[in-house]
Amino acid sequence: MGNESFDYTEQYKKLYEAWEKTMSEAMDVWKKNPLVKTGVEEAEEYDPVEQYKKFYEAWEKSSSEILEKWVNSPLFAANIGKAVEKSSDLKKHFDEAVEKVLKNMRFPTKTDIDRVLSSINNLEEKINDLADKIEEANTPPPAPRAQKKK
Amino acid sequence: MATKPKSIPIIDEAEKAKEKFLKALDITLLNPPDVEVGTSPHEVIFTENKLRLLHYYPQTEESCSTPLILVFALVNRPYILDLMPGRSVVEVLLKKGIPVYLIDWGSPGDEDKNLDLNHYINRYIHKVVQKVKRHSGSDKVNLLGYCMGGTMSAIYTALHPEEIRNLILMTAGIDFKVEGTLNLWGDKPNFNVDKFIDAYGNVPAEFLQSGFLMMKPVQNLVSKYVNFYENVDNEAFLDSFLAMEKWLNDNIPLAGEAYREFIKYFYQENRLVEDKLKINGKPVHLKDIKCPVLNLIAENDHLVPPASSIVFNDLISSKDKKTVVFPAGHIGLSVSGKSLKALWPEAADWIIERSN
């Protein structure tokens, strides 16, 4: 899955071919429009709702193929990764600035609150463990269940 | 003489389309109905931090003396396994007489960002196993892990084989170097998970949701709603659609440290398959799994490619092991009518045969 094995020209060609296929399928549907063809048979068979559905189906199939190819390309993966990295940098700087301001103003920060909540969670775990030990000490181990017939 | 085209009731069609559109708008945006999910009767028998352990009340005489614990992924809510009456894996299992327990991980807060895989596996799952053993009076439990929960269940079974009678995996990611969208996005050159978690703490729910949507953009953002519009007058379709939508949009964050480890250890370093995984300093060897294993795989899974799960049975020492590749998607494996009729009753029988 490394970038080295990815042929961008080939991928672009594939995307172009998929786009071309979409367009030609859409045009095939459009050509059945009586405004384009005025022959009697075609005109009598023409149902705009049905034709629209066919057009939509052709568009849906081809567009899915194009977009799924795109999101599965290393180029997309690398770019989305870069975007996430940049947004992470931005968020980190912003949060650090807010944290510094609040600290200077002697306000408790989100980090302080999280620390307190985390301590409460640790205490809850210790209490649960102690409660289990007390329960174990006070009750004999349960007898295994009788085997039930199927 | 020019022939006039056949008269088409286009105005009627437009009127019908308008009515359908207004109804669809009303249901989705203006007056969305309250959808009840996760309705199988249950009690909460243990809580710790955000975790809740649910015990479902039996619906028939129990035919199985070993309880089954459902371990869901840390992403999204676990009620997909009990979506609504008639669309519920839990219901199928209860009707077969299996005692069912489910771990609801809850929604982690910012204070939980340091919870790592060790905490989830060796603290939470282990604690739940002890609670269920005590509650049911059984000396062992059956574990059923779904998706990421399947990966964690496999690790737990390898670390604590003495606790598990049967292991059932459902679309569990095991080999992360097979071809797949998430495997590509999560790979080392593309994703700097350290920077991401250092900045965000937990993984925001929106980040996960947008990633899932992007994997199949036309299907998730267009086709689904066109299908909804087409079926807006079909009550049965609407009930299922709205319940599914509720679940799909009921996203939760993921504890940052657990995510960091999951991406690094599995997506980037494939440690489980390469036998290099350590949890809390203890090596995890899949070959230590010797209990009976049922590996359920969704043939059309776009989140966990079938090739990622199928390798599991070759890496364990169990003699009694079975793989089922079922024609469904990642979510369809738990909610599609086809799975609930054909797959799950068979899976329940497999569990019962090995549980007494």
Image: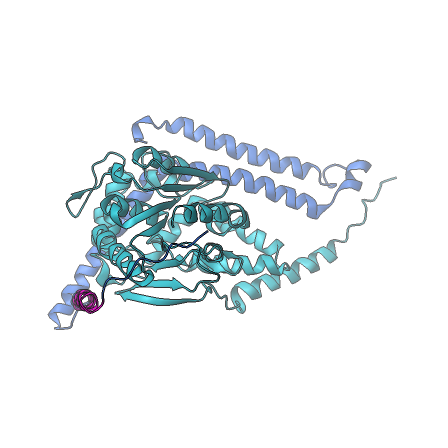
Rendered view: B99 above or below A49: below
Residue at the spot 27% in from the left edge and 51% down from the top edge = A87
Quick check: can you spot residue B188?
no
The quarter of the picture where residue A68 lies is top left
Tell me, what colour scheme is on the image?
Answer: by chain
Residue at position x 33%, y 44% in the image: A80
Count of marks placed on residues: 0
Residue A137 falls in which quadrant of the image? bottom left
Within the magenta stretch, is there residue B228? no
Q: Describe residue B200's horizontal placement relative to residue B69 as left or right.
A: left
Q: Can you give x and y, in whole percent of width and height, for residue B249 in the image?
A: 43, 58
Could you say where residue A97 lies in the image, as x and y percent from the top left? 17, 61
Magenta segment main secondary structure: helix
Q: Nearer the viewer, residue A138 or A26?
A: A138
Q: Residue A78 placed where, x, y %?
A: 31, 39
B78 left or right, relative to B187 = right
State yes or no: residue A119 in magenta. yes
The residue nearer to you, when weighing A60 against B136, is B136
| Quarter of the image that includes the N terminus of chain B | top right
Residue numbers of the magenta segment: A116-139
Q: Which chain is blue?
A: A
Query: Residue reaching furthest bottom?
Result: A106
**B189 or B303, which lies in front?**
B303
* The image quarter in which residue B290 lies: top left
- On the image, the x and y values in percent for residue B55 come to 37, 63
Chain appearing in cyan on the rendered image: B
Residue B70 in sight: yes
A125 in relation to A68, above or below: below
Q: Nearer the viewer, residue A33 or B296?
A: B296
